[in-house]
Amino acid sequence: MKCLILGGGGFLGSHLSEALIAEGHSVRIFERSGFQRANFPNSEVIDWVEGNFVDVDQIAGAITGMDVIYHLVSTTLPKSSNEDPVYDIETNVIGTLNLLELSRKTSNRKIIFVSSGGTIYGIPKEVPIKESHPTDPLCSYGIGKLTIEKYLHLYMVLHGIEYIVLRLGNPYGERQRISASQGAVAVFLNKALHDELIEIWGDGNVVRDYIYVGDAVRALSQAKSFAGKSGIFNIGAGQGRSLNEIIFAIEQLLGRPVRLRYLSARPFDVPVNVLDISRAKQCLNWEPRVSFEDGLRRTWQWMRSEMHSSK
């Protein structure tokens, strides 16, 4: 297949491109202008296109000839999205509408969209959370993801565009960008390795569903073979872990205590989020394989290697 990864230059996209190439598919990546490609895996065999996601002409060129479109673009973070909801709509929702309009005017193709299992549902009424659970996001980031899901469904009904939505939990693993300040596992582990102070919002009992990046990528890869015209799937570990439990696991791995400071809780942090992944197991023939302890160890080994190579 010819696969396009929109926003493919980041953490998840780099692993996905590796997996698709290993399977024998051709890969095109669309990424923002000026993106640093140094040490990007398999860059010599990737068709790399730079541009702006909201530029219709640039997106039209990027999707030409593609069989599968992976939509990984996200210009905001959950913690900052409420500060400028208009920007969220302009850069994420409008860009996706342009993509859908282009898709219906050319040829029907499959779009695989990475949504947010961590923010879509809001405060859960039951745990683990099924895909049928009410959706009441507490941040603009989650509202934007949900809006895109609704437009994907609309364009499938009206124009026959096939889509898959993967409501992803909290991915972690090698190559996660610490500078983005997103991803508790990577941020905490990096600070612990450098003996820096780790700050936790609230009392540390917030529970999330953390999934190793390799498991997440397998779900993305297997989604392209889903026989249905559309589908929404939770993708996570299927079990929860609190921030305090992450800290404990890091201390066990390093063999020493870490420096901690607890801050006031944030209003948009729901107390618990654990995903029911039974639908993905049944329909995508997928399930996570890497335990949290093993995934943490792999991430730790990669970080140590990066630290040594930078000296």
Image (spheres, grey):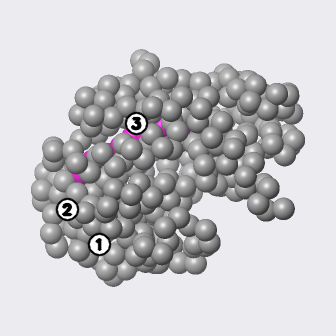
How many residues crowd around disc 2 within 10 Å: few (fewer than 14), some, or many (20 or more)?
Answer: some
Give the residue displayed 45% in from the left and 32% down from the top.
Answer: 289
294 vs 303, left or right, is left
Dot 2 lies on which element? loop
Q: Earlier in the sequence, mark 2 or mark 3?
A: 2
**Mark 2 and mark 1 in contact (Cβ < 8 Å)?**
yes
- Quarter of the image with the C terminus in it: bottom right
Of residues 234 and 270, the one nearer the viewer is 234
Of residues 242 and 310, the one nearer the viewer is 310
Q: Marks 1 and 2, how far apart in space? A: 10 Å
Magenta span main SS = strand
Of residues 194 and 306, the one nearer the viewer is 306
Q: Which mark is residue 50?
A: none
Q: Marks 2 and 3, how far apart in space? A: 22 Å
**What's the amino acid at mark 3?**
Ile
Q: Earlier in the sequence, mark 1 or mark 2?
A: 1
Relative vertical location of residue 199 with respect to residue 221 in this rendering, above or below: above
Give the residue displayed 30% in from the left and 45% down from the top.
Answer: 222
> What residue is pinned by disc 1?
63
Q: Marks 3 and 1, how far apart in space? A: 26 Å
Q: Which mark is residue 235?
A: 3
Relative vertical location of residue 101 with respect to residue 159 in this rendering, above or below: below
Residue farthest toward the top in the current orientation of the protein: 126
> What residue is pinned by disc 2?
109
**What's the amino acid at mark 1?**
Ile
Give the residue displayed 73% in from the left and 40% down from the top.
Answer: 189
Q: Position of residue 277 (x, y in %)?
A: 36, 28
**Quarter location, residue 69:** bottom left
Dot 1 lies on which element? helix
**Mark 1 and mark 3 in contact (Cβ < 8 Å)?**
no
